[in-house]
């Protein structure tokens, strides 16, 4: 939270943005907050590093946030291609596999209980490759031997 506060304070003070986190120009890599502004366009301003300019190709690795009416409503924490979604309106904001709406932790629990990725895919009518991505997402600490 201290890093987020620091980034918000910088954006408010230097970039004159009242609510920078509501901006559709905001992206994150999960650790730092970037904003595409006119002063550095097409590059990004790193709000956590007092306005350091970050190169435009960074956008390919930034995690995406979806907006509706200038409000952040959905976050794809591992990128859209994993299909893992965090949306406060679904499962109380817990990560879900977007195509089926099932919590990633539920898929991991079932996998640890002995179901194969293929069996889970059949049961949930989902691509086993996406179920594997959900398992890997939940296992980012390496707690489960894959």
Image: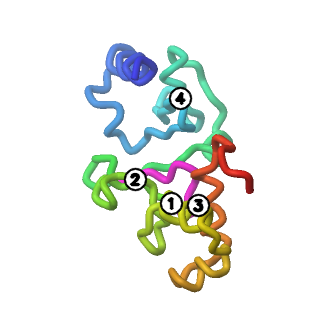
Q: Is residue 4 left or right of residue 128?
A: left
Q: Earlier in the sequence, mark 3 or mark 2?
A: 2
Give how far across and how far down residue 121 sits, in percent: 59, 79
Give how far across and how far down residue 94 sits, in percent: 40, 53
Q: Report how far apart the C-alphas of labels 3 and 2 lie in the structure.
A: 12 Å
Q: Are marks 1 and 4 in contact (CB under 8 Å)?
A: no
- At label 2, counting other C-alpha atoms closer than 10 Å, the crowd grade (few under 14, some 14-19, many 20 or more) is some
Q: In the rendered image of this protein, does residue 127 appear above or below residue 49? A: below
Q: Earlier in the sequence, mark 3 or mark 4?
A: 4
Magenta region: 74-83
Residue 32: image tag: 4
Q: Are marks 3 and 1 in contact (CB under 8 Å)?
A: yes
**Which of the pair 38/110 is nearer the observer?**
110
Residue at x 54% of width, y 25% of height:
46
Q: Is residue 136 visible?
A: yes
**Which of the pair 59/127 is nearer the observer?**
127
Q: Earlier in the sequence, mark 3 or mark 1?
A: 1
Disc 2, SS: loop
Q: Are marks 2 and 1 in contact (CB under 8 Å)?
A: yes
């Amino acid at each position: 939270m201290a890093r987020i506060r620091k980034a918000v304070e910088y954006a408010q003070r230097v970039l004159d943005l009242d609510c920078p986190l509501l901006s559709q120009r905001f992206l994150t890599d999960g650790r730092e907050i970037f904003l595409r502004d006119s002063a550095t366009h097409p590059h990004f301003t790193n709000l956590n590093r007092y306005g350091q300019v970050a190169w435009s190709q960074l956008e390919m690795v930034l995690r995406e946030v979806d907006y509706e009416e200038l409000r952040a409503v959905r976050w794809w924490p591992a990128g859209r291609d994993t299909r893992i979604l965090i949306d406060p309106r679904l499962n109380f904001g817990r990560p879900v596999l977007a195509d089926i709406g099932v919590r990633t932790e539920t898929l991991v629990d079932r996998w640890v209980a002995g179901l194969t990725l293929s069996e889970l895919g059949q049961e949930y009518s989902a691509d086993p490759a996406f179920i594997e991505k959900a398992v890997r997402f939940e296992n980012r600490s390496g707690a489960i031997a894959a």
